[in-house]
């Protein structure tokens, strides 16, 4: 009987070595079938009255299979590693277009005209109505700091030319002084007097003469 056990063990070892040679196998994959094969061959050798190698080999194979199943019964399949998500695509920076350049009034444009009862009779004093118009002009000039103006004084045809020339100059300077008091840079304003030389209406009617008595704010540079 000892001869049978010995032969079975040798056969089992040979089978295990033949199955594992040249392969990367875990220790349990070798040890469990090896122990099972030895046990199976030993059982056959102990209980059999024959020393046939075939019987021993069959017991070893059966024992090896049982040992493999016992060792791997509770093994769980290894889940594959999750594939990492690709990095988010870079967000392209959108550069906003530059703001449009402001549209400035052309040289020669009349921005405002003080006509009629904007001055006291035969004086350069500005009336309340005239100041209200100049307040609006000061706001406009504040929004367009590069615009320069020619402040042009005019009169009707009543009176002598020298008198009307001097009156138109005083009224132009009075308008400049008022705008400066409202925060407009005086370097942007140039007072000019034209007297009665540039009428815009007839001097034969009261309405026409009222239109001729005026101070125009005309764009001289921008």
Image (cartoon, rainbow, N blue to C red):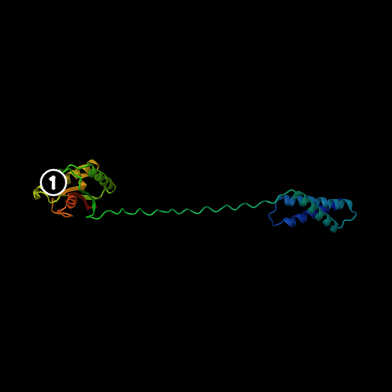
Residue 131 at x, y percent in the picture: 23, 43
Number of on-image labels: 1
Residue 177 at x, y percent in the picture: 19, 42
Report helix, strand or loop for mark 1: helix
Q: Closer to the camera, 145 or 81?
A: 145
Q: Quadrant of residue 109?
A: bottom left
Q: Closer to the camera, 122 or 101?
A: 122
- Quick check: can you spot residue 3? no
Check the image and report above or below for 89 versus 130. Answer: below
Lateral position of residue 218 relative to residue 164, left or right: right
Lateral position of residue 162 relative to residue 91, left or right: left
Residue 123 at x, y percent in the picture: 15, 43
Q: Closer to the camera, 140 or 38?
A: 140
What residue is shown at x 77% (from left), y 56% (from top)?
Answer: 15
Residue 67 at x, y percent in the picture: 78, 51
- Residue at the extreme bottom of the image, as rendered: 54
Q: Closer to the camera, 64 or 128?
A: 128
- Residue at the extreme top of the image, as rendered: 181
Lateral position of residue 154 relative to residue 42, left or right: left
- Quick check: can you spot residue 8? yes
What residue is shown at x 74% (from left), y 57% (from top)?
Answer: 19
Residue bearing the label numbered 1: 167
Question: Mark 1 packing: few (<14 Cα in 10 Å), some, or many (20+)?
Answer: many
- Residue at the extreme front of the image, as rendered: 205
């Amino acid at each position: 009987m000892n001869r049978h056990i010995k032969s079975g063990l040798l056969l089992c070892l040979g089978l295990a070595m033949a199955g594992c040679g040249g392969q990367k196998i875990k220790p349990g994959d070798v040890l469990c079938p090896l122990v099972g094969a030895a046990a199976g061959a030993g059982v056959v050798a102990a209980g059999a009255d024959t020393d046939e190698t075939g019987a021993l080999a069959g017991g070893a194979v059966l024992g090896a299979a049982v040992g493999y199943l016992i060792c791997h019964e509770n093994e769980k399949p290894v889940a594959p590693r999750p594939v990492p998500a690709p990095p988010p695509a870079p967000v392209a920076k959108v550069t906003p277009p530059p703001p449009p350049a402001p549209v400035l009034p052309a040289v020669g444009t009349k921005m405002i005209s003080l006509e009629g009862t904007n001055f006291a009779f035969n004086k350069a004093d500005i009336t309340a109505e005239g100041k209200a118009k100049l307040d609006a002009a000061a706001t406009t000039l504040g929004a367009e700091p590069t615009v320069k103006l020619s402040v042009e004084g005019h009169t009707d045809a009543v009176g002598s030319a020298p008198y009307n020339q001097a009156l138109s100059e005083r009224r132009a300077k009075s308008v400049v002084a008022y705008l400066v008091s409202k925060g407009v840079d005086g370097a942007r304003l140039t007072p000019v007097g034209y007297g009665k030389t540039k009428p815009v209406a007839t001097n034969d009617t009261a309405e026409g003469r009222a239109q001729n008595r005026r101070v125009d704010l005309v764009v001289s540079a921008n």
